[in-house]
Image: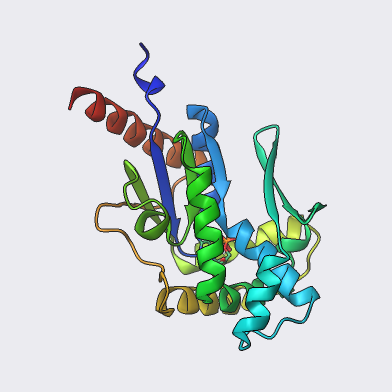
Amino acid sequence: MHSLHRKITIAIDGYSSCGKSTLAQALAKRLQYIHIDSGAMYRAVTLYFMRHNINLADLQEVQDALEKIAIYLTFENDLQVTWLNHENVDAAIRAPEVNLMVSPVATLPAVRRAMVAQQQRMGEGKGIVMDGRDIGTVVFPHAELKLFLTADLEVRVERRWLELQEKGISISREEVKTNLLERDHIDSTREDSPLRKAEDATIIDTSYLTPKEQLQIAYELARSTVDSIRIA
Ligand code: CDP
C-alpha cells in the first residue's frame, strides 16, 4: 500500500499573511486531502455582525445572532467557497472593513465555541489540512502533524498588499502593516485560545522560501509523519 494512504490530520497555524492558506491549499491538493481555511469562517461571522450592527459587548445579542448564522464550505476545483446563509461571501469577507473587525469578533468565546465545534466535526474523518490560529492548540490538539508558520513583517506586508492589489482593492502598505500588527496583537493576547505555537509544532519561516519550497518541506514532513505512524 502507498504509505500516504493512511490519512492524518495536519494543523497549520501562524500570524496573518505568513502564507498559511497558500501552503495548506497546496499541501492538501498534493496529499488529496481536504483543505479548510478556518479564518474564512471567522470572517463570515464578522460580515454578518457588521451587516446587522451587532453590538459585540452585548453577549445576548451575539448569541442570538450566532443562532441565525449558518456557514457552509463547499469546494470548486479544490478551492474552498464560503457560504453565509446561502450567499457566496468569498469576495466580501476579504474586504478591508472585515480585516478591521475580524479579530475583535474572534475574541468572543461564544463565536469561538460555535466555530470550533463545526471545525472539529469537519475533521472527524481525518485527511484534512486546516489552517488558522488555534488549530494545533485547541481545534485538533492531537493532530499528527502541526506546523507553525512565521515570516518577516515586511515580507508579510508586501504579500498581503499585492494580494489586495490583485483584487483591485487600493490600500497603502502602511494601512496593511497597521492592520496586520493590530490583528497579531489581538489574536495573540486574547484570553480564549490565543495564537501560540503548540509545543509539538514545527516552525517554518517562509520569508525567503518560494511556495514550491514551502510545499516540499511540508510534504516531506507529512510523509515522514505517516511513515512513523505506520512503523509504530
Ligand atoms: O489570511 P489572514 O492570515 O489575514 O487571516 P485569516 O486566516 O483569514 O483569519 C482572520 C482572523 O480570524 C484572524 O486575524 C483571527 O482573528 C481569526 N481567526 C481565529 O481567531 N482563529 C482561527 N482559527 C482562524 C482565524
- In the image: residue 129, left or right of residue 88: left
Tell whether 9 sits left or right of 211: left
Give the farthest residue toward the left. Answer: 232
Residue furthest to the top in view is 1
The N terminus sits in image quarter: top left
Total count of labels: 0
* Vertical order, 102 against 163 (above or below): below
The one of 129 and 170 positioned closer to us in this rendering: 129
Which quadrant of the rendered structure holds the C terminus? top left
Question: Residue, x 40% and y 40% (percent of image)?
Answer: 9
Q: Residue at x 48, y 38 (%)?
A: 128
Residue sitting at the far bottom: 57
Image quarter for ligand 1 equals bottom right
Q: With 122 as the anchor, is 87 left or right in this view? A: right
Across and down, in percent, residue 68 comes to: 73, 66
Is any part of residue 136 visible from this angle? yes
Image x and y of residue 204, in percent: 36, 51
Residue 150: image x %, image y %?
41, 59
Specify how the rendered protein is coloured.
rainbow
Is residue 96 in sight in this rendering?
no
Could you say which quadrant of the image residue 84 lies in? bottom right
Task: Look at the picture and state if 212 lies above or below 64.
Answer: above
> What residue sits 19% from the left and 23% below the top?
231
Q: Nearer the viewer, residue 209 or 189?
A: 189
Q: 58 above or below 82?
A: below
Residue 207 left/right relative to 65: left
Q: Residue at x 44, y 79 (%)?
A: 190
Foreground of the two, 220 or 195: 195
Which x, y percent locates residue 164? 71, 61
